[in-house]
Amino acid sequence: MKDLKMAWRNLWRNKRRTLITVMSIFFGVLLSIVMGSMQEGIYGSMIDNVVKTYSGHIQIQHPDYEENKNINNTIFESDGLIDSVLSIDHVTAAVPRLKNFALISSGEKTRIGMAIGISPAKENNLTGLKKWVKEGSYLENGDRGILIAKNLAKHLQAEIGDTIILISQGYHGANPADLFPVRGILDFPTPELNSLGVYMDIETARQFFYAPKMMTEIAVLADDYEEVPAIERKLEEMFDSRYNYLSWQELSPELVQFIESDKGSGVIMKAILYLVIGFGILGTIMMMMAERRREMGVMVAVGMQKIRLSKVIWFETVLMGIIAVALGFIISIPLIAYLTANPIPITGEYGEAYAQFGMEPVIYFKMAFSVFYQQALIVFAIILAISIYPYRVVRKLNTIEAIRG
Amino acid sequence: MAIIDVKNVKKIYNDSEVAVHAVNGIDLSFEQGEFAAIVGPSGSGKTTFLNMLGGLDNTTEGEIVIDGVNVSNLKGSKLINFRLMNIGFVFQAYNLIPVLTAKENVEFIMELQGKSKTERDKRAKELLSAVGLGERINNRPNKLSGGQQQRVAVARALAPKPKFILADEPTANLDSKSTENLLDIMEKLNKEENITFIFSTHDSRVVNKARRVITVEDGKVISDVRK
Ligand SMILES: Nc1ncnc2c1ncn2[C@@H]1O[C@H](COP(=O)(O)OP(=O)(O)O)[C@@H](O)[C@H]1O
Ligand SMILES: [Mg+2]
């Protein structure tokens, strides 16, 4: 207690020295929080891209659908089913879809693609489908027409107003075939979606597939991907094993793999970052110890135990760490909040390169509690490791030499 | 009875090719209430001797017995504690703790001894008044002149009530007026409170004030005169 008080007094009595050390730790905390939040933000926006343009965070499916993507493995849209999904905390949208493979023909040309039945208004809420309509118009509720993805339209040489023939497999062995006018052409930011298939109103799809009230999936959107496990638990609680619940990780394993490998290569970057931070802090601590050699020598000469002196200095180091980490939080919380709300646009050549790969030319940040406490813990661990240094200096202090100065 | 007994003490430095006999066999004893100067040219071994006397440095040979305790056998935290309870130090370069005020510097050793706040407060104020710095108790060392800092250092050395005070060239950095002033204070404390001072110097005015003059050369005592 006395030692802590002595340490606290020493900090305030040498404000310049304290400020330099606190600042060196503070910048470390700030830097690592900004980097961490940026990384999370980039992953978040990548996940959002996939999740919000198509898959949703969770899909509710028939237990057998994942194994056998057959229109017979569908679920029934009972009254209130979607509403009860929507009632779960952090669920922002839940939309029904009915889809199956189909032969898609126009004139002489034929391709295989997906025929996806959607609820136009609800789907737009979840995936913002409407904004990808490049030509023509979006679907109305109950529309008899279709939207066709760009690359597919090109192959089929289909244009707005043309008629498309769909031939598919229907529910319980039916063999549907019908004609649909093209209402619009879709231009997505990702190539896979541009070759995927055609979109139609879900009621039109149900008639076509002879599958009234049926769905192949309910796509669920959460307000934050970190809430997905909680939502899944809740779904299991509500519906037992009546359905299969697939998270975005299971729906987009390539994305998960990419993020994992990116995190892996990021480890080296982070190691370098912490090394820089660590040596920055160590440098100021070493300076501090050099500056105080004589003072410490005098203290030991007049009768202060070395163990006590090192305790006081250890407290000083840790107190400075606490102050700096707190300061880092106070500054970085509003900063990251601002950057989360106002992502940084990438301009010039880099921006164009991003756009070419179908990525938004924007650096996103994410305000994640995990980033804050992880970075605080890591920086604090660095400080604890560094605080061994003053301890060793005191232990090895040669009193006579130190006094001579 | 002697409070310090020095028996054939030697200090040999072997770190260069030729061994340096910094202190080469000194036998001395000091009584309570002495005012003794150790005189000699630079390099004669004064600092080395005082460091051993103060338990800051170990002896190569011989022993130093203070109040019946063989200090030469003490090590580590026991030795530090012995210094804390028994010996007062005044250094040539003042060596006050820069972040502490004059009063806090005087209280510092008492704080290490575990003395209560009220006792520390009272004694620090008394001692600073005694050395003529009653008005400057809240000044940091960098706001004090060299002479004033050295007077704070004397007050600091006295505060824990040591058995004796060692001062290695305490006036070497002071002008003649501050030197005289400091010596007057030391002399007064010696006469009125029977405080034992052992100090080294090569300033003849300081030597003149001493009641015992021990002259060393090449690590040996060549004369020991009491006035
Ligand atoms: N740490 C040391 N290593 C080697 N030689 C030393 C050391 N300290 C002092 N000496 C030598 O011991 C001798 C006495 O030094 P010192 O006690 O400082 O003399 P004084 O204080 O009388 O000037 C000198 O020759 C000095 O060079
Ligand atoms: Mg000397």
Image (cartoon, coloured by chain):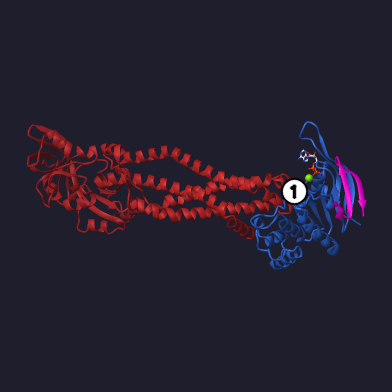
Ligand 2, what quadrant? top right
Q: Which residue is mark 1?
A: B76
In the rendering, at what x and y percent does residue B99 appear? 63, 56
Residue B217: say if magenta: yes
Front-lying residue, A284 or A360: A284
Position of residue B40 in the picture relative to residue A11 (left or right): right
Front-lying residue, A394 or A214: A394
Q: Is residue A180 visible?
A: yes
Report the quarter where the C terminus of chain A lies. Answer: top right
Front-lying residue, A307 or B137: B137
Front-lying residue, B192 or A74: B192
Position of residue A176 in the picture relative to residue A325 (left or right): left
Position of residue A92 in the picture relative to residue A366 (left or right): left
| Chain letter matching colour blue | B
In the rendering, at what x and y percent does residue A170 appear? 14, 43
In the rendering, at what x and y percent does residue A224 appear? 33, 52
CA neighbours of label 1 inside 10 A, class few (<14), some (14 to 19), many (20+): few
Which colour denotes chain A? red
Quadrant position of residue B24: top right
Question: What is the secondary structure assignment of the residue under circle 1?
Answer: helix
Asked if the residue at label 1 sits under 8 Å from ligand 1, the reply is: no
What's the residue type where badge 1 is placed? Gly
* Picture residue at 76% right of the left edge, 65% below the top: B130
Disc 1: which chain? Answer: B
Report the quarter where the N terminus of chain A lies. Answer: bottom right
Q: How many marks?
A: 1
Position of residue A172 in the picture relative to residue B79 (left or right): left
In the rendering, at what x and y percent does residue A399 appear? 72, 47
Residue B153: say if magenta: no
* Picture residue at 49% right of the left edge, 47% below the top: A378
**Magenta part of the chain:** B206-227
Q: Is residue B68 visible?
A: no
